[in-house]
Image (cartoon, rainbow, N blue to C red):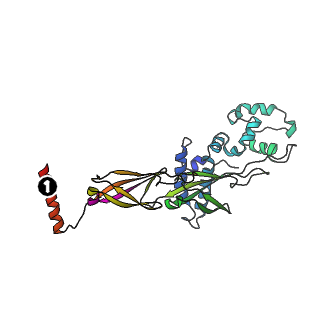
Amino acid sequence: MDYIDYYKTLEITKAATEAEIKKAYRKLARKYHPDLNPNDKEAEKKFKEINEANEVLSNAENRKKYDKYGKDWKHADEFEKAGYNPNQQQQSRQQQNNQNYSDFGGGDFSGNDFSDFFNSMYGEAGSGRGQSKYRGQDFNAELQLDLATAYNTTKQNLTVNGKNIRITIPAGVENGQIIKITGHGGPGANGGPNGDLYITFVIENNSDFKREGNNLYADVNLDLYTAILGGEIYVNTFDGKVKIKVPEETQAETKVKLKGKGFPIYKKDNQFGDLYITYKLKTPTKLSLKEKELFEELAKLRHHEQ
């Protein structure tokens, strides 16, 4: 197996953070996605390489193994048991030459053929040790939802590696949130367990609400007369309109909290964040002559009192 520099594939450095890895993957995945590059074999190949790199580097444990063992990162656990340290390999190379590996037929194993040696030692039926079980590769997928869909618990059908999977998405899932579907990754080897499927959610907000965690924010127009005299108005929430009371002499930019009218809290039934509304004063236009006269009288009265 040839060594593939996953950092180079994602166009990042080894010092990249998890957020930088995610950002780089999304950018490149969109650029080379088959739907945007139909019948482009090179783009299809690049897309697969990008996903492979992301599957390794987006998983902290796999990334650690890859950084240490390179192309043989999947065998890290067996390497550790065997006492193999790639940083000391050059130092121990001469010692390996002098040892008599009678159990395995002897030989000199350099860095390039260590993987072959390891496979014969553990992976294939030989030398009486039997076959080792290897866990399958983890898969990564991205699922896009709009904010209204994320407000309710929904079921979605996904096709991953040629298999159909039906999943339940709890209400309140957040943008960028990752969930794990156990056992729906790549198949294991020699009877080993399957890998897992990691789904990253991309929540698109096409609503009039701004979401921050479990809270929602919205602007509400308030006419001048209601602001001055007070009254009742109806405002939109995600589950319908609600009536609220506006006090007399309410000022522009006044903020009001509607408790429990925000977004569902993830995996907590019947628990919600809050909705915060900000009043935007709406000045009347196209006034009649009579209205202008009344406003002039009010202005004179106000100035006289002052």
Residue 245 falls in which quadrant of the image? Answer: bottom left
Please name the residue that numbered disc 1 is placed on: 301
Q: Main secondary structure of the magenta part?
A: strand
- Identify the amino acid type marked 1: Leu
Q: Position of residue 169 (x, y in %)?
A: 59, 57
Front residue of 200 and 217? 217
How many numbered dots are placed on residues in this image? 1
Q: Position of residue 158 (x, y in %)?
A: 63, 62
* Left or right side of 199 for 93: right
Up the image or down, 248 lies above or below 291; here it is above
Q: Position of residue 53 (x, y in %)?
A: 61, 50
Up the image or down, 13 lies above or below 179; here it is above
* Left or right side of 278 for 121: right
**Is residue 125 among what the camera can see?**
yes
**Is residue 31 among what the camera can see?**
no
Does 236 lie within the magenta span? no
Q: Position of residue 72 (x, y in %)?
A: 70, 44
- Image: magenta residue range: 216-226
* Left or right side of 56 for 15: left
Residue 83 falls in which quadrant of the image? Answer: top right
Q: Residue at x 49, y 54 (%)?
A: 263
Label 1: which secondary element: helix
Up the image or down, 78 lies above or below 9; here it is above
Q: Residue at x 50, y 52 (%)?
A: 272
Front residue of 125 and 26? 26
Front residue of 168 and 188? 168
Does 223 lie within the magenta span? yes
Residue 63 falls in which quadrant of the image? Answer: top right
* Left or right side of 130 for 305: left
Label 1 crowd bin: few (<14), some (14–19), many (20+), radius 10 Å? few
